[in-house]
Image: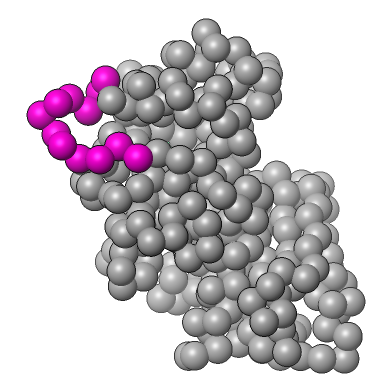
């Protein structure tokens, strides 16, 4: 008996098979924007079926790259991953794999993954931020994921770090995500985020906005640790050393709040490990 974990993101989607809490199979594919949702569903069905091997999954967990209403298990909005709004993904998965399903947004799912199996283990409250195609945040307390009244807690991506900045997809201006995420970096500078992070001069400017967003999390939550996952976090010290210095500069001596910011330990698998935890929760429902 096994658990199926799914991570649907803006540029790729991944699936993993867990047996006795160990990842035994993993597959990752680029998100085919042309084929869209139907293409991805057909891949999920095919890969899942090939892993089932006549067996049933105990449960399925899914992290989705956009706002999810956890209470109703609905995708609220799919800006980075098109075509999912209003589609009942959990019902489709339940029907397809004949197993209980639980879905959350990928930042909350990543927070669960890093908080229970990665760089956030033992650190509570934990603030997890995904820095990739977009920006999302997840808050993990001793009691579990803190989702707020309407599943919107932690949506730090649309905090305004530059009120006079360029228009964001959400309708506001100079949002944290607008200034710092991979999608917009590529559009604004014509270079990939990975390439830009190798340019110390660019990074020295970039961390100013990045620290502004993170400072909000520090001030509001006083987290024991901040873990940053997603593609851009792979830049390592080239990003994290200047980021820590800038954060120490912005959070003045007045505050004794700890400033512990580290990259995700599970690399591309934070969300998959979190989806394992969602699957385990689904089993208990
Ligand atoms: Zn915005």
193 shown above or below 230: above
Residue 97, how many percent across, how many down? 74, 85
- 108 to the left or right of 54: left
On the question of residue 264 being in view, the answer is yes
Q: Position of 251 compared to 66: left or right?
A: left
Q: Of 274 and 171, which appears nearest the observer?
A: 274
Residue in view at x 78 percent, y 55 percent: 28
Looking at the image, the residue that sits furthest to the front is 122
Q: Which residues are magenta?
A: 249-260
- How many numbered badges does the structure rendering display? 0
Residue 133 vs 283, above or below: the answer is: above
Q: Residue furthest left?
A: 254
Q: Main secondary structure of the magenta part?
A: loop
Give the residue drawn at x 51%, y 17%. 203
Which percent across, then down, holds residue 147? 34, 64
Which residue is located at x 64 percent, y 76 percent?
21
On-image quarter of the N terminus: bottom right
- The vertical placement of 119 against 141, above or below, is above
In front here: 144 or 46?
Answer: 144
Task: Identify the residue at horizontal 53%, vertical 27% (top origin).
Answer: 237
The answer to whether residue 45 is visible is no
146 left or right, relative to 98: left
**Membership of 255 in magenta stretch:** yes
The answer to which of 79 and 134 lies nearer the viewer is: 134
Does residue 1 belong to the magenta stretch? no
Q: Residue 240: x percent and y percent?
A: 48, 29
Q: Quadrant of residue 132?
A: top right
Residue 112 percent coordinates (x, y): 47, 64
Colour scheme shown: one colour
């Amino acid at each position: 008996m096994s658990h199926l974990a799914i991570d649907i993101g803006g540029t790729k989607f991944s699936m993993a098979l867990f047996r006795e809490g160990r990842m035994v199979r993993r597959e990752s594919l680029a998100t085919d924007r042309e084929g869209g949702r139907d293409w991805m569903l057909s891949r999920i069905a095919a890969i899942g079926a090939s892993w089932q091997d006549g067996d049933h999954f105990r449960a399925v967990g899914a992290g989705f790259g956009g706002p999810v209403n956890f209470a109703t298990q609905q995708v609220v909005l799919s800006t980075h991953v098109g075509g999912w709004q209003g589609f009942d993904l959990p019902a489709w998965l339940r029907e397809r794999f004949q197993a209980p399903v639980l879905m959350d947004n990928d930042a909350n799912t990543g927070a669960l993954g890093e908080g229970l199996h990665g760089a956030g283990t033992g650190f509570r409250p934990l603030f997890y931020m995904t820095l990739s195609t977009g920006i999302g945040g997840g808050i993990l307390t001793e009691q579990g994921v803190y989702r707020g009244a309407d599943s919107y807690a932690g949506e730090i991506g649309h905090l305004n770090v530059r009120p006079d900045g360029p228009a964001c997809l959400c309708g506001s201006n100079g949002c944290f995500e607008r200034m710092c995420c991979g999608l917009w970096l590529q559009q604004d500078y014509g270079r990939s985020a990975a390439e830009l992070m190798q340019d110390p001069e660019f990074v020295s400017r970039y961390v100013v906005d990045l620290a502004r967003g993170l400072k909000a999390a520090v001030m509001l939550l006083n987290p024991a640790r901040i873990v940053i996952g997603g593609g851009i976090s792979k830049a390592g010290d080239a990003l994290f050393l200047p980021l820590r210095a800038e954060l120490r500069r912005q959070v003045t001596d007045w505050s004794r709040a700890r400033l512990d910011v580290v990259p995700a330990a599970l690399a591309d698998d934070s969300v998959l490990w979190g989806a394992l935890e969602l699957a385990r929760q689904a089993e208990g429902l």
